[in-house]
Image (cartoon, grey):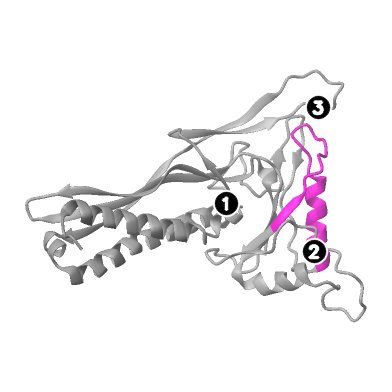
Amino acid sequence: MINTPSVFKANINAVFDQERQKQEKTLVMPRYLDEVTTDERWVTNIEKVGFGLYEETDEMQQINLDETHMKKFAKAVLIPEEWLDDVKAHKDVWDATRMLVDSAMLTKEYDGASLVNNITSSSYMGGDGVALASASHPLKGGGTASNYQSSLTPSESSIGTVLVACEKMVNSRGYITGIRGKRIFGPSNYKFTFKKLLMSPDAPDTSNRAINAIKGELESDYVSIPYLTTTTSWGVKTDVRHGMKWYNRRKLRIRETSHDRSEVKQWTASYRANRSWDDWRGVQWVPA
């Protein structure tokens, strides 16, 4: 290995990018948040109110205005200049580089999960003035609507109840639009329970051999999120276009950010992103 600053820098970047690409494939967060790439410093969260039935002539209106500012996340590692000349130390540098990626991916997981952890919190309200999961989302034409179920233990029957509730959700004008549930997500505590409920060919936990009515109703298997604070609540992600989102402003990168007189190089990894939601109909939530 040629121990020159340029080669050393190239190797750090190569190790970093290789590790980033590998770990991005294993993230849990993109399975329950829709990833969106944006080139804006902030995005405006708007619930778009569609037209009424076809004979109506009202033009589309936009309500529930809110803004989501991109946040920057960063972590740095200091590398002594002497390590350039020490081949044995290079392994430590590569390990430190990979650990920067580890830390970034874990930050993304916790940040994404915080949207679910605060899904009913009045401290995290949407543009309509209530939490993401609420029984009192205001409608444009008056009245309220809910995406908040009563407490339901996971079962074939309770899953069916929530999927029907998804289909019965109304738009901002009060019309049922046939929203469909796509996948169930929740704490790791339920991963084997839901695997049995969603994948068994026959009705689970019964002596009769009726079919499992839930099998095939969803697009994917259960999304197990180990970063949730709840151990009993769960939710259904729907096919609404603008539900829970993860905004990528700038992907994770690494840079040499300083080289001072003490001959210590600082390498800083950072990314810019945020999470939010536009339309509360992107989820049906089942509390503990």
Residue 221's x, y, as percent? 69, 63
Q: Specify the amino acid type for callout 2.
A: Ser
Residue 156 visible in image: yes
Region of the chain picked out in magenta, as a range? 156-183
- Disc on the earlier residue, 3 or 1: 3
Question: Which callout, 1 or 2, points at the residue further toward the start of the chain?
Answer: 1
Indicate the secondary structure of the residue bearing disc 1: loop
Residue 203 falls left or right of residue 126? right
Kindly report the distance in space between the C-alpha atoms of the residues bearing marks 2 and 3: 32 Å
Closer to us: mark 3 or mark 1? 3
CB contact under 8 Å: marks 2 and 3: no
248 lies above or below 152:
above
Disc on res. 158: 2
Residue 138 inside the magenta-drawn segment: no
Q: Report if residue 181 lies within the magenta region.
A: yes
Classify 10 Å Cα crowding around label 1: few (below 14), some (14-19), many (20 and above). some
**Residue 52 marker:** 3
- Residue, x 39% and y 58% (percent of image)? 18
The one of 151 and 95 positioned closer to us in this rendering: 95
Q: Secondary structure at mark 3?
A: loop
The residue drawn where x is 35% and y is 49% is 253
Q: Quadrant of residue 141?
A: top right
Can residue 286 be seen by looking at this rendering?
A: no
Q: Are marks 3 and 1 in contact (CB under 8 Å)?
A: no
Left or right: 20 with respect to 30?
left
Residue in the image at 61% along x and 54% along y: 32
Label 1 is placed on what type of residue? Ser
Q: Residue 121 has which mark?
A: 1
**Foreground pick, 175 / 213:** 213
Question: Which residue appears at 90% of the width and 81% of the height?
Answer: 207
Question: Residue 27: where, in percent of width, then height?
Answer: 52, 59
Quadrant in which residue 211 is drawn? bottom right
